[in-house]
Amino acid sequence: MPAVQDTIDRVRKIDVDQYKYGFQTEIAMDKAPKGLSEDIIRFISAKKDEPSWMLEWRLEAYRRWVTLEAPTWARVHYPKIDFQDIYYYAAPKSTPGPTSLSDVDPELLKVYEKLGIPLREQEILAGVQKTDVSELEEPSDNVYKSGRVAVDAVFDSVSVVTTFKKELAQAGVIFCSISEAIREHPELVQKYLGSVVPTSDNFYATLNSAVFTDGSFVFVPKGVRCPMELSTYFRMNEKNTGQFERTLIIAEEGAYVSYLEGCTAPQRDENQLHAAVVELVALDDAEIKYSTVQNWYPGDAEGKGGIYNFVTKRGDCRGDRSKISWTQVETGSAITWKYPSCILRGDDSSGEFYSIAVSNGYQQVDSGTKMIHLGKNTSSRIISKGIAAGFSQNTYRGQVSAHRKATNARNFTNCDSLLIGDQCGAHTVPYMEAKNATAQFEHEATTSKISEDQKFYVMQRGIPEEEAIALIVNGFVKDVIQQLPMEFAVEAQKLIGISLEGSVG
Amino acid sequence: MNIHTTPQRTPAETALIDAFGDRLSLLPGDGTVMLKRDDAIEAIKSGLPTRRIESWHYTDLRRLLTSVPDFDPAAAPNAIAPIVEGSAVLPVLNGVSSTKTPDIEGIAVQRLSEKLTDGSIAPGLDRYGADDAIGALNTAFVADGYFVDIADGTELDKPIELQNLQSGGQTHVRLLTRVGAGAKAVIVERQTGEGAALVSSVSQLLLGEGADVTWLIVQEQPDTATHLAQFKAHLGKDSKLTLFVMNAGGKLVRQEIVVKTTGEGADFTLRGINLLAGDTHTDVTMVLDHAVPHTASTEVIRNVVTGRARGVFQGRINVHQYAQKTNAKMACNTLLLSDDGEFSTKPELEIFADDVVCGHGATVTEIDHSHLFYLMARGIDEKTARGFLVKAFVAEVIEELDDEAIVEALEARLDDWFLAHG
């Protein structure tokens, strides 16, 4: 059946090398010299006006890092990274610490506008003003209305703006950049930073501990349900820079927070490194929902350029009955290498991991999760959907373990892979380790292509082939999409359409 | 975690290297074979695999192999009866094959020492990968075994039983079998003995076009023995291999299964039972390559873990890029019956072809309480009821083999184990 012109255009538009966030913006930047040394770390620390304990912490991580070698066990292949050829600090010059949107460089705002990030959208803007007003007039009345999103925008190395800060503060929620948190709330940062991902955890986490430049900090106090979705947008703009952000989210007893991160980068021929660390801490009865829509530049159709996305994400269900849920939609990056994990320490705690990883072109994905059951009656659920097309390699790697004392640990894992084309690969590498007789683990995995039967069923109802495939794929990933916050489910669905249809056509 | 240091040799590594020096003059082989032996011992000199080597992640051989016994020329194991009456028995006693070989039409049997001496099996001595420690150990020390050649079109009515019996010391054995086109056979590989032995055993099987073989590995080593074994097979066009593995003994056991489909229409079935008790470590590792289109495989592994036993199943299915229309399914089910036992499983799929149907499932659990209740409500005491359920769990796999004599023989082995381990 010949495809209609409209479909052809749409498919062409969304081809791999048509990455629509690939623009670059000329903004005056403040950069540290290339390379990494103790001096650079002192420079970063001084730039951020950090207390001395923070500098010591960084230097200790750096000294540890120089003794480590980059790990090679993952199913990803890339030329050796020259860590001395990266700028570890790049910040837009005109940001001496903006407090409201009007202080921000208009060029920067244009960037976020192009990305479709609602920083400057009318309602949000009204929201910003309302915050100012509400402080004087009607406190906390409309704070709990949903449908609004507080945004922290990170541009290269620094956080440029955080919206809705004051409104959140009324609810007792602290949402700011991590640099600000180090200055304003050192007691909280000192207590929790590195308590989930220790500085010496792994090569890239250690590097991050030494050089991290910014990221978000969220603190939701006891009993508070965060009144709106929190969100961070990461943008890598400068050439040859690495982005090393650090996110720390703490939910005290009975608190709830939903957090979303999104990422993009310009189109370049060389590869850029993104090595972030995300730490989540959930105390008794707390719940953290962390969603990622990752759309870093994936490289062009020949596999040139793109982001290396080497990220350590870990949540600690420290309290009883706590819950951490990871949802990720991975469509970007030349290489994605990350395992958002849950340590189920508290009794009756639960962890969830929902993932869609779509790879096309020459992308490589090695992602999955770890569920470490330590407490009693803990449960975890893993739903992973991998879709490989083009020349890409898509690997699910996950670990589920029940320790001696983890009585009644429950896990259900389901990882399905879909292959589109005969040049790509899909791999499943689950590790299951049970050390307790009452543990119940179930794992199932399948790999297949879209069956002719399914396609025929849909097509004989008058739906053209490409739409039929899109429909089946959407059904395939539905379990995961459902877990995303409403606002972003639509965005994620679009992203999947983009990455996939380019290959189906 | 990534700091690399050159570790000192463990006592076991030193013992192996020293033993090689002592044994060298006694080992059969022509120039090529001896060169392969040198390569193999070099691999051992660079260290036994640790958990840092991915394929040995759950079996840190360097740490677990604490001692290596000396060769014991005086050891003399007793002959045992085959599991199926009337089988043609080919015994290897303490690493030495018998000069008397049964005379069966269509079968040529040769002692492996002869084939080592004339160098005709040299190509088969290569390791299959850098992490093939069992292959290296065996190639370095192998002195004997059998080469069984089943002629085209031969249909055997009785099984052949290859017995590898030891009574302490070290034994290194290789069993080669070629099954000709259209031939049909049942082959039993017995691995048993007594004493704290170190056994390495490599079986190689070549299936011709349309050949149909059922291969049973029955491993019942004493709980003091270290058993490092490998089963390698190539499946030709339209051939069919049913491999059954039963591990019911041994202190440190690693059974590797390396199978490759090389002809279209090949069909591979693996059924495995691991009965684990005491303070033991048992690892079954399978690597299955679907290298050509239109091949099929199914694997079912059932494990019962009691006492302080540790069990491992790693199964990797590789589907090569041109192996379209592959149909591969794998399941690994574990009953974990004690709090001190543990089981780790890693079922892997590596798929490079798109028109395939592949799946795997893995479960770890204890006995279903509703099943137990059902039986106990009928007046059966808990212990007996548990026994029923556990036995039914593993016997299910045996019953799939459609040869009555073999099913009976294996169930008898199963009963023996349950009798010994309650």
Image: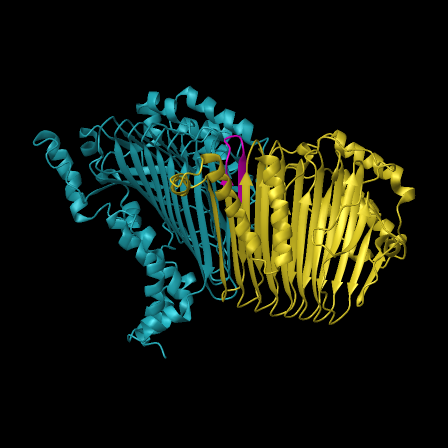
Q: Which part of the image, by quadrant, shows the N terminus of chain B? A: top right
A46 or B371: which is nearer to us?
Answer: B371
User: In which quadrant of the rendered image does the C terminus of chain B lie?
Assistant: top right
- Residue at image point 32% right, 69% down: A467
Give how far across and how far down residue B157 sits, in percent. 71, 64
A271 or B411: nearer the eye? B411
- Asked if one can make out residue A94 in the rendered structure from this viewpoint, the answer is no
**What residue is shown at x 70% (from left), y 43% (from top)?**
B228
Q: Nearer the viewer, residue B387 or B232?
A: B387
Residue B394 position, x and y percent, is 54, 47
Q: Is residue A255 above or below residue A124?
A: above
Kindly tell me whether residue A23 is visible in this rendering: yes
Q: Residue furthest right?
A: B25
Among all residues in the image, which is located at the extreme front? Answer: B379
The percent coordinates of residue B10 (x first, y second) are 74, 30
Quadrant of res A323: top left
- Left or right: where B404 falls relative to B221: left
- Viewed as shown, does residue B364 lie left or right of B205? left
Of B343 and B381, which appears nearest the observer?
B381
Q: Residue at x 64, y 61 (%)?
A: B241
In the rendered image, residue A451, in percent from the top left (x then y), is placed at: 42, 68
Question: What colour do you see for chain A?
Answer: cyan
Chain B rendering hue:
yellow
Q: Residue at x 60, y 38 (%)?
A: B419
Is residue B303 a member of the stretch shown in magenta?
no
What is the span of residues highlighted in magenta in the rendered image? B335-345
Marks counted in the figure total: 0
Give the answer, above or below, for where A237 lies relative to A248: below
Pick out the residue farthest to the bottom.
Answer: A1
Tell me if B170 is positioned left or right of A466 in this view.
right
